[in-house]
Image (cartoon, rainbow, N blue to C red):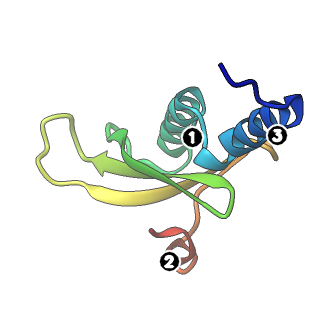
Amino acid sequence: MQLRPPGIAMAVLVTTTSLTGCFGPSKADIAEAKKDCSSFYQRERAKSNAVVHPIDNWTKDGVIVIELAEKATADATSYTAHICVYDKEKGTVSLPGAFHQSRWLK
């Protein structure tokens, strides 16, 4: 049996721990972003009786971007897509206007 020096084990532990932050937001953070973005859009911009739900998500520049679908009714087959930007660190949710959405696209 060959033992490794404690320095190597510590380096592996530190590297593994520091890399976990590089893999993006947690499932809980994404779920929270989807919920907050959907309700914020429903309250601020959705037409009356419209149904809003998340259809995609990604990260960009350290924030979670949620793509929302707005349907006229629950039974509607077509929808309009909108972007919501969720910044957990700053505690903000924003809905970029038409001229600023391209900055947040994939």
Residue 54 in the image: x percent, y percent? 38, 42
The mark that comes first in sequence, 2 or 1, is 1
Q: CA distance from mark 3 to mark 1?
A: 44 Å
Q: Amino acid at mark 3?
A: Ala
For residue 27, above or below residue 21: above
User: Could you say which is closer to the camera, residue 25 or residue 3?
Assistant: 3
Residue at the extreme bottom of the image, as rendered: 99
Q: Which residue is mark 3?
A: 11
- Residue denoted by label 2: 102
Label 2's element?
helix
Distance from Cα at disc 3 to Cα at disc 2: 41 Å
Sequence-wise first label, 3 or 1:
3
Residue bearing mark 1? 40
Residue at the front extreme of this rendering = 1
Residue drawn 74% across the image and 38% down it: 12
Q: Position of residue 73 (x, y in %)?
A: 21, 39
